[in-house]
Amino acid sequence: MSLTAAVLSGLLFVAMSINIERIMRIVTLPTREAGTLVLFVIPLLIGTWILIPEQSSTMLGVELVATGLLGGGLLLRLNRPSKRAEQETWGAWLLGSYVPSTMVALLTVLGGITLIAERGGGLYWVAPAVVIALLTGLAGAWVLLVEILR
């Protein structure tokens, strides 16, 4: 999980550096791609917290709650409606940015809370958060690598 997120973050940086002039010309892209980077960093942090040896489930839960709250706050700020591209429909914005970002944050926080409480699912809530983050981040990276050149 951490390796995948790290590799995809590197891919995003390469895509951004290759297309930086085009990205900067489109006013909504820099914040969109910052959100994509956050989507890759969240699984990277989750994987890092899980790999800490001999850590209590309570401490892992606290780390997950903090990651979900901070990452979710950043994602919600970066994906707010005022940052939506003019040609992007509300439905595409909701399903492509807002809902996935919210789900990643909520599932991560829920996983942390249930770990602290020692009931209710624990890391089973975190797995879909990681999958959603990586898939949504891949869509953002695709925009930078392919769609921006159209």
Image: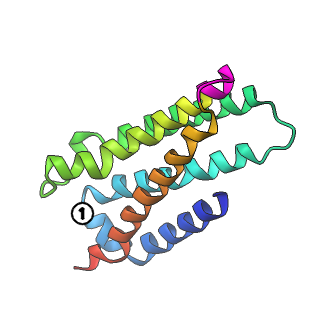
Q: Residue furthest top?
A: 117
Q: Is residue 75 left or right of residue 90?
A: right
Tell me the SS state at disc 1. loop
Q: Residue furthest front?
A: 120
Q: Is residue 19 left or right of residue 68?
A: left
Residue 84 shows up from this direction: no
Residue 90 shows up from this direction: yes
Label 1, residues with CA under 10 Å away: few <14, some 14-19, many ≥20: few
Figure disc tally: 1
As rendered, which of 55 and 34 lies closer to the eye?
A: 55
Give the residues in magenta.
113-120
Q: Residue 57 location in percent, x, y?
A: 75, 30
The structure residue drawn at horizontal position 64% and vertical position 45%, both measured from the top left corner, is: 46
Above or below: residue 71 compared with residue 4: above
Considering the image in quadrants, where does the C terminus appear? bottom left
Residue located beneath label 1 in the image: 26
Q: Residue 145 location in percent, x, y?
A: 37, 75
Q: Tell me, yes or no, whether the highlighted magenta stretch contains residue 43.
A: no
Above or below: residue 111 compared with residue 18: above
The structure residue drawn at horizontal position 24% and vertical position 63%, both measured from the top left corner, is: 26
Applied colour scheme: rainbow
Q: Determine the image quadrant of residue 5.
A: bottom right
Q: Residue 77 location in percent, x, y?
A: 36, 38
